[in-house]
Image (tube, helix red, strand yellow):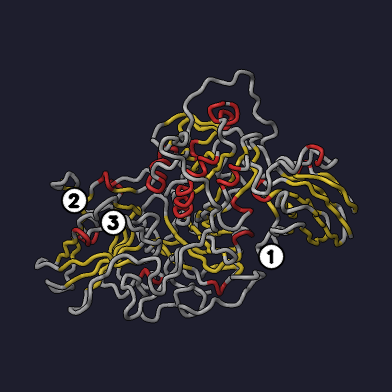
Amino acid sequence: MRRALLAFCLFGCATRSAGDDPTLLEGPEGAPPLNGSGAAPGEALPPPANGCAVGVGLDRVAGQIEDDAGLAVPGARAQLCVRRAADGNLLCLRPGAADATGRFEIAVPAEARCVSRATLRVVQPDGLYAALYCELGLEGAPDIDDDAPWVLFRASRGGLDPQPTPGGGQTVGLSGGIQVDVSPDRLYFGGDGDASTLGGRRISPADPRLCGTLLGPGFDGLYAFSPEADVDGPGFALRVPTPELAPGTRVAFSVLGGLSCTLSDGTPVPEGQWVEYGVAEVGADHFVKARGDAGLPCLTWLGWRALDPDEAPPAGPPSADAPGALPPPVLPDEPDEPEDPSPEDPPPPSTPPPAAPPAGPCTYPAGAPQTPRTGQVMPALTWADAYDADGSIGAFSMEDVFCDPAYARYTTIAFIVGAEWCPSCPDYIREVAQQASAIDAAGGLIVFVETEDNSYRPDSSRSANSYLSRLIADAPSIRVGDGDTRPARAIYNSPIIQSFPTAFVVRRSDMRVIADQNQVAGMLDFAGLARGGGGGGGGGGASCGPDDEEPYEPNDSAAQAARIGAGTFAGGVCDGGSDFYRVDLAGAWRLDLTFRHADGDLDVYVWDERTGRPANGANGRPLGSDSATDNESFQYQGPAIVAVLGYQGATAPYRLTLSQ
């Protein structure tokens, strides 16, 4: 199939027409439509397809990665992000690495397969090439395997020896004659990048190997930097040779949003979207000397075009309500939070001060798997170096959280899991950070975990703290990198982590994972879970006790699933975990779960032992029943494991009926 060559627009693509905000840039005349669907901008997506009630089913994306010399790029990463059609959530999947021939393949997990948009970022972790951003056309779904290669352009390290600048920085000369005045202390690469690794490449805007709006709105010049980097504060002074333009010509500069790109006023530039941000003039030497508002705000892709004499300069960055712009992801309404503590009664810090060990021996709950799994005991993970909101460093462990009375005021631990290469993660992280004080006051300890850096290497706590501090400032929380997790990489290897961003919540009283982001649309109610003591929002454990438990206990994991036949019996999810049953009926059967929603919101699913999560049907929805009313029921056929669990840790007694 032929690839739809489009820009990577995570927050919506828009075209520009007369009178619209000039910073929302359209592609060149004749470029494919900007929604990647075969429909013109503003038209509806095609009808539901490939087993999805909404959106288009996408099972697999594959292709070939080559450089601009036609050679394979082994080890390059193909990073797929999808907009889930059912709820608008943006998910970035684990990247696929190219093999020795440059071939990559990405399997889309069931919970992410029904999509309205799919985009690809292609990057070589060593930074020898500029990152590529393109949107996929969905007409080839569910199996997209492009015949045209994804082309990465090699970036040279520079030509001139760095020269000191009066401000204490250095002038770096790059290939193509471009010079940038770099202040290393204001240059943020993420991971372990630094100014010495900076490279670039001038590319013809007419190069047919460029995809979609990388061509820009009629650019006269195009430049790609590597590795991607953001500039803190004012943009770097820039000198661009433009021998094709007459002296005195006004030139408008545009920048492409990347993993992290902000204008000098702190306004973020959406990933994969071109924004015109400043104007400079061609000098008598045919160089454009761009300073001030025209200074380079980030090192991703830079485009420039000559302005007509009567053309107005760009009006600034795009706004959320700009004409034609799609809105950012919609987050669910947040529940009412308790009033902020008065200045005289501030909340305790997120990391309690050292305290004396408990008076008696403390034994961590038994039965934990090697990696976190929903409904099971959290492994006793440790980090030798964890960062607090104030930058202090110390050891942090799940055993201390459970045993040390210094953590006694916490009822839950919320793990917010991301990756530095994930374009969809910053918004989720910022949203959690905005709620952090309320979550902390409700009894929720927040732990931000970065699994990998920009180069797809296991992230250190030091790198994770540097990255997170730019997003969450001093929000009460712990910040760690999964590269420092012991046992090694236990978070990244968890079956909970299928896409990014994600999160899961541990109840401190028994260190059981009671909720994960994959189970809900929108964001988990972290504060509500903490206020309920880890018992969820449906009444906690008050309505359910040991006398309500089913006669099949212990059946709290798939391995302990109780074998049941046709009949009715009483039970209860009373500890915030799950109850598992093994159905051995050969034909069709029906399961009815009767309970009062006022006691607690229970759901019932067919369980996938391999992933440790609810199984998914062809439409991407979990197999089972999960309404927000009294009672649940569904029909199925053949042997299966069934799980009864409380929504976000809710508890309630129930009656279960299995019939044929």
Q: Secondary structure at mark 2?
A: strand
Q: Residue at x 40, y 66 (%)?
A: 320
The foreground one among 215 and 274 is: 274
| Label 1 to label 2: alpha-carbon separation | 56 Å
Q: Is residue 383 above or below residue 442?
A: above
Q: Is residue 315 above or below residue 184?
A: below
Q: Residue at x 30, y 70 (%)?
A: 204
Q: Give the total number of marks visible in the rendering.
A: 3
Q: Is residue 490 visible?
A: yes
Q: Residue at x 30, y 75 (%)?
A: 218
Instruction: Answer with the quarter of the image where residue 520 lies.
Output: bottom right
| Label 3 to label 1: alpha-carbon separation | 46 Å
Q: Position of residue 458 (x, y in %)?
A: 48, 42
List the residue tagged with mark 1.
618
Counting other residues with Cα less than 10 Å from the Cα at mark 2, is it few (<14), some (14-19), or many (20 or more)?
some
Q: Position of residue 333 (x, y in %)?
A: 54, 58
The quarter of the image holding the C terminus is bottom right
Q: Position of residue 255 (x, y in %)?
A: 31, 63
The foreground one among 446 and 333 is: 333
State if disc 2 and disc 1 touch (CB < 8 Å).
no
Q: Amino acid at mark 3?
A: Asp
List the residue tagged with mark 2.
171
In the image: residue 610, left or right of residue 456? right
Q: Secondary structure at mark 1?
A: loop
Q: Amino acid at mark 1?
A: Ala
State the mark number for residue 635: none
In the image: residue 200, left or right of residue 11? left
List the residue tagged with mark 3.
265
N-terminal of the two: label 1 or label 2?
A: 2
